[in-house]
Image (spheres, rainbow, N blue to C red):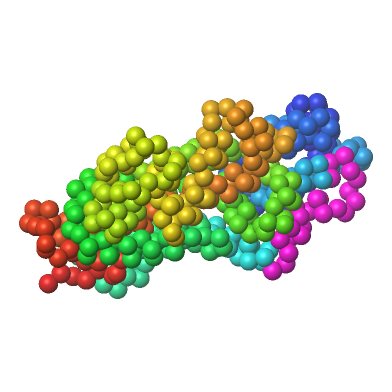
Amino acid sequence: MIMRHHLKCYGCEGLFTVRLGTEPTKGTRFYIPCPLCGYPNKGLMSGMELEDHRLDLECELANGPDPEISGAPVITVNPFVPSRYDADSLASEAVSVGMFPTMTVLQLLGDEVYEAFQTERHEAIEAGRSAWPEVRKLFRFYLLGNDQMFTRIANEKFGLEWEPTTAHERTTVAYQALGIVTTTITGTTGTSAEGVIRRFGMKHTAAMKRDDSHLMAFRSRGQLTAATERDLFTEIDRFVDQHESWELGLLSRFVGPEAKSELEELVLYRDEFATVRDLYQQGFELACKCLWPLVAAQNTLKRSSPDDFGDAHPDSVPEKLRPTNLKKFDGLANAYKLAYVTQVPGWESFADLLNNRRRNTIGHAMAHHDLRTGRVTSDKDPDGMTYLEFLGETLGVFEALSTLAQVLRAVRVASSPDFNVPYDWKPGMTPPADAQTAPRRRG
Ligand SMILES: [Zn+2]
């Protein structure tokens, strides 16, 4: 809904009217650029219901009867929908597309795509709000090792009709629940997760059969993956908790190449750069720490050892840095790790999801959100990107994290304490359950 407010600009003290788009929100930081002087008047709105809606503004409300400020400029600001800057500021209230931000997006996408976008968007928001709290609870009990509570939540909240009695069964249940919600939040348009995970599953299964060293590598990294599992869950939880601030990144996946330049002109009046950048950066770093199982599967499949990189080095990786085992791979810079992964057919999408060039712009110490232009820039990259593109990059990192969580699941299952490796494991013995199929009880 749109609320009208008459405001006195905090900067120039001039009077103007804002038509402020309002939606249920846990808390949204935004700004209203003064149509007279350009000063970004900051604000915070919150409230999931209309009754408890709260608006805090840096500038004063200019009370008084309407006629007093008739003729004052009007601006439409909707922190939930991108719109054209200056579309109607300084203009009369004549109907123009820019006045109705939703119309702007509708025009940009066309009816059909707009509807698909709205459907995915609302499913994503709903998944984060209503399904995630239960998944969070389930996963926390999984991490705590409270098997009793884990089973209770799985039965009561997820309709699981059997009792997961082994660690690898609980791992599978926990990650399936996680995956359902993260997949919904990522949406289906323009995603690559399914293909990446399927390909990894095939390679991983084949690698287990190919050489025992593959399983041994996963087992010997048990401690490492336990810590990574906790960090990965914590990070995904932070992303979902802050979903409102970056969910509009989804829009970039619905805009065709011909409309890209129009998207460039849209401004989103949100003022949450610091929050979202923090998610983006931490998520990016963590995702790069979780790439090794992909590389391990590829190495074993091709050369019978997860540590054997053979001659398959990307050109971009300097000769002296080329890893000779997984441990050395762990120590590589993110760009080089990504180069190893993205050279494998089917995994190229990580180059888009974790775009290192954009990471350098966003993560640069001088990077900032220019409220006038609506762009994220740094002194190294003065052109930068639009805030919407930045949110699109953040969605990319979230997709990478949720995809890699499912990759990590295979590692956790394969290295489960249920299988009496490494103590009684000997080369030549059959590796335990196939990590990608539903686990069966042993014996
Ligand atoms: Zn002003």
In depth, the one of 140 and 246 nearer the eye is 246
Residue drawn at the location 61% of the way across and 51% of the way down: 248
Residue 226 appears in view: no
In depth, the one of 37 and 232 nearer the eye is 232
Residue drawn at the location 36% of the way across and 37% of the way down: 319
Residue drawn at the location 68% of the way across and 56% of the way down: 257
- Residue 330 x/y as whole percent: 32, 41
Residue drawn at the location 92% of the way across and 40% of the way down: 71
In depth, the one of 334 and 229 nearer the eye is 334
- Residue 430 x/y as whole percent: 14, 65
Residue 58 appears in view: yes
Asked if the magenta segment contains residue 91, the reply would be yes
Compared to 335, does 103 lie above or below? below
Residue 216 left/right relative to 438: left
- Residue 179 x/y as whole percent: 40, 60
Q: Quadrant of the N terminus?
A: bottom right
Q: Which span of residues is magenta-colored? A: 88-112
Q: Quadrant of the C terminus?
A: bottom left
Compared to 168, does 269 lie above or below? above
Residue 320 left/right relative to 12: left
Asked if the magenta segment contains residue 372, the reply would be no
- Residue 165 x/y as whole percent: 20, 65
In depth, the one of 187 and 200 nearer the eye is 200
Quarter location, residue 43:
top right
Compared to 394, does 40 lie above or below? above
